Image (tube, helix red, strand yellow):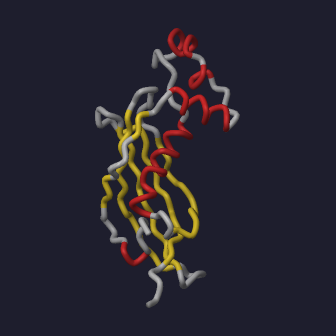
Amino acid sequence: MAGLYFEEFEVGQVFRHAIRRTITEADNVLISTLTHNPAALHLDEEYCRTQTEFGQRIVNSCLTLSMMVGISVNDTTLGTTVANLGWDEVRFPAPLFHGDTIRVETEVLELRESRSRPANGIVVFEHRAFNQSDQMVGICKRTALMHRKPKT
């Protein structure tokens, strides 16, 4: 099991995830079309070159969020989570572009017992994504309902 059980987390624990990912044009177009998001910011190179401050298409924020959380899963919650309870304070302080490579780090912010599910605990994570220049491109808090260690 790659993920950690509730009891194996500590507040302040930081994971610097080894997986990095270069974001491609195909990634961006696929998530934009899958989510029915026709925004020119993601799909129209000419529009972005001539009519935006970015000068090129920016990556759909749904992809940034998905990569930020997805990259963290193997080290934190793979096989040990019951469910995500919510994502809060999602921010994208800088754009992500085709060809950027992201890396992610995760910090455990809070641990608490589940009042309604004694076999589980609740972990609040903060995920932070950075581009290849170490500029933060995404940050969010994720609350996860986690399994406790099996009794042996």
- For residue 37, side relative to residue 15 (left or right): right
Does residue 38 lie above or below 4 as drawn? above
Farthest residue to the bottom: give it.
Answer: 152
Farthest residue to the right: give it.
Answer: 36
Q: How many marks?
A: 0
Residue drawn at the location 42% of the way across and 65% of the way down: 2
In the rendered image, which quarter is residue 136 located in?
A: top left
- For residue 144, side relative to residue 128 (left or right): right
Residue drawn at the location 44% of the way across and 81% of the way down: 149
The quarter of the image holding the N terminus is: bottom left
In the image shown, does 148 or 140 lie closer to the viewer?
Answer: 148
- For residue 75, side relative to residue 147 (left or right): left
Residue drawn at the location 45% of the way across and 57% of the way down: 73
User: What is the x, y in percent for residue 49?
Assistant: 50, 12
User: What is the x, y in percent for residue 69?
Assistant: 47, 51
The quarter of the image holding the C terminus is: bottom left
- For residue 5, side relative to residue 133 (left or right): right
Does residue 68 lie above or below 116 as drawn? above
Residue drawn at the location 58% of the way across and 66% of the way down: 83
Does residue 3 lie above or below 118 as drawn? above
